[in-house]
Amino acid sequence: MTRPLSPLWPLDWWSAWWDAWGSVPYVAPLRDAGQASALEKLHATAFARPWAAHEFERLLCERSTEAHALRRGSAILGFVLSRKAADEAEILTIVLAPSARGGGHSHRLLREHLTALSFSGVRTVHLEVDEGNAPALKLYGRHGFVRVGERKGYYPLPDGSRATALTMSAALS
């Protein structure tokens, strides 16, 4: 026995295909604290000490947080979170899904995030990055970040050792 087709079946098929294959990744504001568990899982793909869902929930509920997601359909492929204070901001974290790395998506995500920060009145952005993270250092350099200091033993590594964090800043125009 076959099930009768829904009058919307062509649309259902198209939507499923579009979400899986046809859509181009796009950057959008991230405001839904209900996405915290997805952010936690994605964050764990890139950091030895990933943040817990409750940390993302808290950040997404704060007025001082600026957050953007790289999406394809309904899936989050990456995100960036910053905290603003007066005319400065600090990028707290940026991460892309392993499947989205290496395709220039981090450049687009960061560029659009920095543009939004600029439009909100931020003039200077700060961040910390593991000194051994060559792709991130290249990305930040492309966006005008310069090294201003370092924090020895700042990042825990999977083997139990600790890595130095470079502190960087960029002026937004």
Image (cartoon, rainbow, N blue to C red):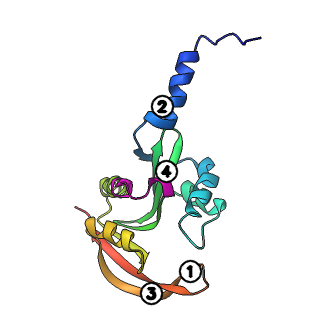
Tell me: 137 left or right of 14.
Answer: left
Secondary element at tag 3: strand
Along the polypeptide, which appears first: circle 1 or circle 2?
2
Along the polypeptide, which appears first: circle 3 or circle 1?
3
Q: Quadrant of residue 8?
A: top right
Mark 1 in CB contact with mark 2 (< 8 angstroms): no
Instruction: Point out the residue furthest to the front here.
Output: 1
Closest to the camera, between mark 2 and mark 3, is: 2
Q: Main secondary structure of the magenta part?
A: helix
Mark on residue 17?
Answer: none
Start and end of the magenta stretch? 97-109
Along the polypeptide, which appears first: circle 4 or circle 1?
4
Identify the residue position indicated by label 3 in the image. Answer: 151
Secondary element at tag 4: strand
Along the polypeptide, which appears first: circle 2 or circle 3?
2
Mark 3 nearby-residue class (10 Å; few <14, some 14–19, many ≥20): some
Quadrant of the rendering where the C terminus is positioned: bottom left
Instruction: Point out the residue furthest to the left here.
Output: 173
Q: Three-letter amino acid code at disc 3? A: Arg
Identify the residue position indicated by label 2 in the image. Answer: 18
Q: Closer to the camera, 109 or 46?
A: 46
Secondary element at tag 1: loop
Q: Three-letter amino acid code at disc 2? A: Trp
Mark 2 nearby-residue class (10 Å; few <14, some 14–19, many ≥20): some
Mark 4 in CB contact with mark 2 (< 8 angstroms): no
Q: Gap in Å between the C-alphas at discs 2 and 3? A: 45 Å
Q: Note whether residue 97 is visible.
A: no
Mark on residue 157?
Answer: 1
Q: Gap in Å between the C-alphas at discs 3 and 4? A: 29 Å
Q: Note whether residue 11 is visible.
A: yes
Identify the residue position indicated by label 4 in the image. Answer: 77
